[in-house]
Amino acid sequence: MATWADVARIVAELPLTVEHAPRDWRVGKKLMAWERPLRASDREALMRAGVEPPGGDILGVRVSDEGVKLALVADQPEVYFTTPHFDGYAAVLVRLAEINVVDLEELIIEAWLVQAPKRLVKEFLEERASISPADSQ
C-alpha cells in the first residue's frame, strides 16, 4: 500500500520536479501526478458502467498514451481506472491504497519520462544505465 508520502518522496528524487500545490507534482511546468478526488459526475459515470466508485485517495498520473492507460486498467482494474472525463487524455487514475510502492515508483518515473525535457530524459537514462546492479546494492 502506497501513501502520499511515498508519492512525494519518489517525485522529489527526480530532476527538475516540484510540488506546485499540495499534491500536484510537476516536472518543470508540466503536470505529471496529482491528487484527483472523484467528482459527482465521475461517480455517476462509474455506476452507470457497473463499476463501484472507489473510496480512499486517488492519484492521477500521466502516461505515454491512451493505449498504456487502457492496458493498465485492463491488467489491474483493482489498482487502475479511468472515467469519461479522461477520455482522449493520456492519464490514468490510481487507487493509492491498492498500488505497491515498487509499481508506484515505476509509474511515476514513466510519467516523469513523458513530461521531462528530452535532454534531461537522455541524461537520466544514461545515468541509470551506467549504474550496475552491484553498485545499487
Image (cartoon, rainbow, N blue to C red):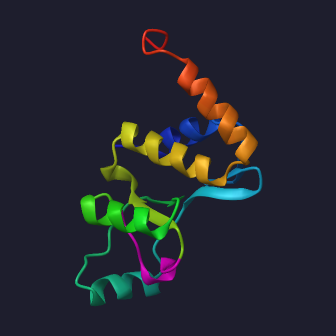
Q: In this view, does 60 lie above or below 50?
A: above
Q: In this view, does 16 lie above or below 54?
A: above
Q: Is residue 1 visible?
A: yes
Q: Where is residue 60 in the image (x, y as percent from the top left)?
A: 51, 62
Write the residue at 57% across / 19% down: 130
Q: Is residue 99 above or below residue 88?
A: above
Residue toward you, 46 or 91: 91
Residue toward you, 66 or 11: 66
**Which of the 4 image quadrants contains residue 31?**
bottom right
The quadrant of the rendering that contains the C terminus is: top left
Look at the image and give the residue range highlighted in magenta: 80-88
Q: Where is residue 116 in the image (x, y as percent from the top left)?
A: 69, 48
Write the residue at 38% across / 43% down: 103
**Residue 74 is inside the magenta segment:** no
Residue toward you, 43 or 60: 60
Q: Position of residue 108 (x, y in %)?
A: 52, 46
Q: Can residue 16 be seen in this view?
A: no
Write the residue at 31% across / 57% down: 79
The number of numbered badges drawn on the structure is 0
**Which of the 4 image quadrants contains residue 75?**
bottom left
Q: In this view, does 107 lie above or below 135?
A: below
Write the residue at 65% across / 54% down: 115
The quadrant of the rendering that contains the N terminus is: top left
27 with respect to 54 (left or right):
right
Residue toward you, 126 or 21: 126
76 with respect to 131 (left or right):
left
Q: Position of residue 114 (x, y in %)?
A: 60, 53
